[in-house]
C-alpha cells in the first residue's frame, strides 16, 4: 500500500525505513476502521506522522520503527520531549477547527522487520 513518492530516490535508507513504517502503521490502523485525515502534518513546533479519525475522535499517531528491541525498542523512544512536541503540534493542527473534537494520542511501535517476525504494537491514548 506504499504511496508513490517522486522524491524516493533522494531519501536516505533511514528515511525510506521510516516511510515504510508509516505505510505499515497506516495499513494496520485502516484495517481496524480508522480513517486517514492527514499524513505528515508539519508546523514550526514539530510533526505528527498520521492524523486519523476514529468515530468522532481525532487520533494523533506517532509511528516509531526500530530494527531491534535494544535500548527499550520503538515504544521507549517516545521521550517526554517528543510527547511535548506532539502536544504542541496537535494544538496547532486543532486551530483549523471552530470547536476542537475529542482527541487522543496513539503510538504505533514497530520492532524489527514485520516480514521476518517483527512486532507491531498499537498503543492507544498514551498521553
Image (tube, rainbow, N blue to C red):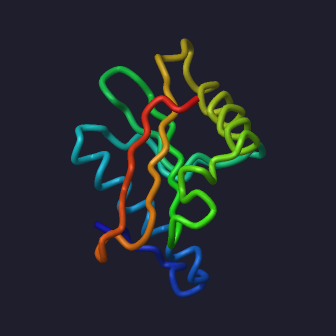
| Horizontal relation, residue 45 to residue 26: left or right | right
| Position of residue 65 measured from the top left corner of the image (x, y, whole percent) | 51, 63
Residue positioned 73% across, 35% down in the render: 84
Q: How many marks?
A: 0
| Position of residue 24 measured from the top left corner of the image (x, y, whole percent) | 35, 61
Where's the N terminus, which quadrant? bottom left
Q: In this view, does 22 lie above or below 80?
A: below
Residue positioned 29% across, 55% down in the render: 27
| Position of residue 13 measured from the top left corner of the image (x, y, whole percent) | 56, 83
Q: In this view, does 125 lie above or below 111?
A: above
User: Looking at this view, is 29 or 74 the one in front?
Assistant: 74
The quarter of the picture where residue 100 lies is top right
The quarter of the picture where residue 73 lies is bottom right
Where's the C terminus, which quadrant? top right
User: Looking at this view, is 43 or 125 the one in front?
Assistant: 125
Residue positioned 38% across, 73% down in the render: 113
| Position of residue 56 measured from the top left corner of the image (x, y, whole percent) | 35, 20
Q: In this view, does 66 lie above or below 105?
A: below
User: Looking at this view, is 87 or 77 the one in front?
Assistant: 77
Which residue is outermost to the top?
A: 99
Regarding residue 94, the answer to whether it shows in the image is: yes
Regarding residue 18, the answer to whether it shows in the image is: no
| Horizontal relation, residue 95 to residue 61: left or right | right
User: Looking at this view, is 68 or 99 the one in front?
Assistant: 68
Residue positioned 54% across, 79% down in the render: 7
Amino acid at each position: 500500500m506504499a504511496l508513490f513518492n517522486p522524491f524516493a530516490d533522494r531519501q536516505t535508507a533511514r528515511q525510506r525505513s521510516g516511510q515504510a513504517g508509516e505505510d505499515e502503521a497506516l495499513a494496520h490502523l485502516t484495517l481496524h476502521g480508522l480513517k486517514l485525515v492527514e499524513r505528515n502534518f508539519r508546523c514550526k513546533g514539530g510533526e505528527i506522522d498520521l492524523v486519523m479519525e476514529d468515530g468522532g475522535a481525532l487520533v494523533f499517531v506517532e509511528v516509531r520503527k526500530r530494527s531491534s528491541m535494544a535500548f527499550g525498542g520503538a515504544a521507549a523512544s517516545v521521550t517526554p520531549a517528543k510527547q511535548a512536541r506532539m502536544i504542541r503540534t496537535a494544538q496547532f493542527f486543532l486551530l483549523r477547527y471552530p470547536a476542537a473534537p475529542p482527541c487522543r494520542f496513539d503510538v504505533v511501535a514497530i520492532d524489527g522487520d514485520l516480514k521476518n517476525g517483527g512486532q507491531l504494537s498499537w498503543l492507544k491514548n498514551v498521553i
